[in-house]
Amino acid sequence: MPIYLFPISELREQLQAAEVRKQRLIEAFKKTSQDFREVCYQLTGYRIDALNDGKYRLSPVYAESPDDHLLFQREPTGECMLLETNFSSQLADLIELHLSQQNSIPAFLAAVIMDLFSRQTFDTPEAVTLPSTSAQIPPQLMHQVEAGYGHEQEVEDDQGQGQEAAYEVVEAEEEMVEEEVGEEEEYAEEIEGEEEDESDSIESDVDSRPSDNEGGEESRSEAEESDDDIVCID
């Protein structure tokens, strides 16, 4: 069986080409993976990092401390289990409601995000009130909170001014309607008076007509009598 021998230079070129393809694939995978993690972070509010032994660390976007994170263990069956951390120990109420009773990890993660977001905007709903902690809002987030509070005040002022303007417009429209109704009533009264005057004049004309007829009949009878007298004289 013949043995084909390739030049060493050719083998080196093939090896270099394979290394270049491998490096490009690694870079493309890193970029795709990074883009995917950023999209997940923006959409879900959690930065997900894969650790050893099938563990995943979830860092909330609204965490009050960089050390606040959740830890999940993925079992061989595919089921994910929440592991205890310093941060999860503060979420006993949410864990009992969404994991123990409802058995819903997505609902639990969403409730955690909503609770952290409410803490930062000073608008914590009573339904998801959690035990208070000694953690304070980080300084880098304080200006965002103050800016949000100021924006809310501006919105409330604008709404109050808008309501006052709307009330003024409604009152002006009501006054215009009342004036128009008054003018229409006066015009109706004037027309009614004119109609009464016309009816009175018509009745007076009707009353005067019989006397004229009687006068005509008397004149005609006198003329006939005069004619009879004239005939008798002849």
Image (spheres, grey):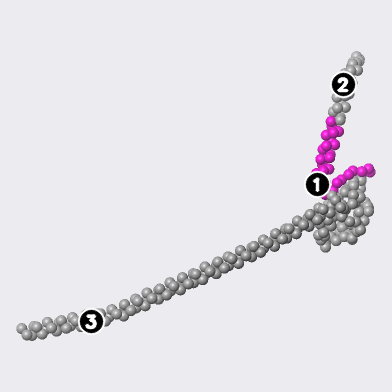
Quadrant the C terminus occupies: bottom left
Confirm whether residue 32 shows in the render: yes
**Residue beneath disc 1:** 42
Foreground residue among 113 and 82: 113
What secondary structure is found at the residue carrying circle 1? helix
Foreground residue among 134 and 23: 134
Q: Is residue 179 above or below residue 141?
A: below
Quadrant the N terminus occupies: top right
How many marks can you see?
Answer: 3
Mark in front: 3 vs 2: 3
Amino acid tagged 2:
Glu
Confirm whether residue 111 shows in the render: no
Residue 124 is one of the magenta-drawn residues = no
Q: Is residue 215 above or below residue 169?
A: below
Marks 2,1: beta carbons within 8 A: no
What secondary structure is found at the residue carrying circle 2? helix
Residue extent of the magenta highlight:
24-53
The residue shown at (58%, 67%) is 174
The residue shown at (84%, 54%) is 142
What number is the disc on residue 13?
2
What number is the disc on residue 101?
none
Seen as rendered, the residue at the extreme left is 234
N-terminal label among 3 and 2: 2
Mark 1, residues whose alpha carbon is within 10 Å: few (<14), some, or many (≥20)? Answer: few
Cα–Cα span, label 2 and label 1: 44 Å
Cα–Cα span, label 1 and label 3: 111 Å
